[in-house]
Image (cartoon, rainbow, N blue to C red):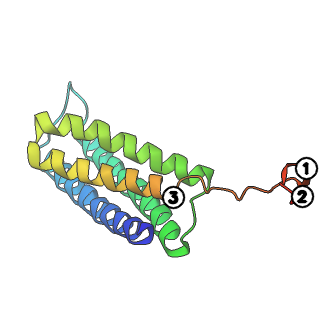
Amino acid sequence: MRRPVAIVTALVLFGEAVGIVLINAVLATVAENQHMSLAGMDPDAMSAGTWVMGGVSGLLLVLCGLIALIAGVRDRTPGRVGRIVLIGCAVVHGVLGAVTVGLVGWAAFAFMMAVLALLVLTLLSYGPESRPQTQRPELTPTAP
């Protein structure tokens, strides 16, 4: 069951990456066309910053999706760095879920919690592998 969960997690993260890039593209275009500024900041800087934030967020989501996809295809636990990246992605989704419930609504919160659940399920299903216990000869019971 862990392979399909990891692959679904990867596909959801890839879709989310596309969505984040598109949302930031719309925000950057609106900020540029209406010459919006925040506390006197240059509108071009606002637009460029929004483009950069969308690109970086999209790349990070694609990286998380690739880690989950590779884990699912190989059916092996991600390495230490891969697990740290997936844990960081899960934490970000939890925090953003808490923020979106107030700003966007319950539907966005439900989506963020679903992605969080997929990430946690992937991390738990690919947990530390149980190592086979090697028996020492002095502890092995012998027949009389």
Do the residues bearing badges 1 and 3 touch, measured as CB atoms within 8 Å?
A: no
Numbered disc in front, either 2 or 1: 2
- Quote the CA–CA distance across marks 2 and 3: 43 Å
**Mark 1: secondary structure:** helix
Residue 97, quarter of picture: top left
Question: Residue 90's mark?
Answer: none
Question: Residue 138's mark?
Answer: 1
**Mark 3: secondary structure:** loop
Seen at 57% across and 66% down, the residue is: 76
User: Is 134 situated left or right of 104 in this image?
Assistant: right
Residue 38, quarter of picture: top left
Give the residue number, with chain letter if any, for mark 3: 126
Q: Is residue 8 above or below residue 128?
A: below
Q: Crowding at label 1, few (<14), some or many (≥20) Cα neighbours within 10 Å?
A: few
Q: Is residue 35 above or below residue 7?
A: above
Task: Give the residue type at disc 1.
Answer: Glu
Query: Which of the two labelled residues, at mark 1 and mark 3, occupies the earlier sequence position?
Result: 3
Q: Assign the C terminus to one quadrant of the image.
A: bottom right
Q: Where's residue 122, x and y in %?
A: 42, 58
Do the residues bearing badges 2 and 1 touch, measured as CB atoms within 8 Å?
A: no
- Quote the CA–CA distance across marks 2 and 1: 15 Å
Residue placed most toward the observer, 36 or 4: 4
Give the residue number, with chain letter if any, for mark 2: 144
Seen at 53% across and 71% down, the residue is: 75
Q: Where's residue 69, x and y in %?
A: 46, 69
Numbered disc in front, either 2 or 3: 2
- Quote the CA–CA distance across marks 1 and 3: 34 Å
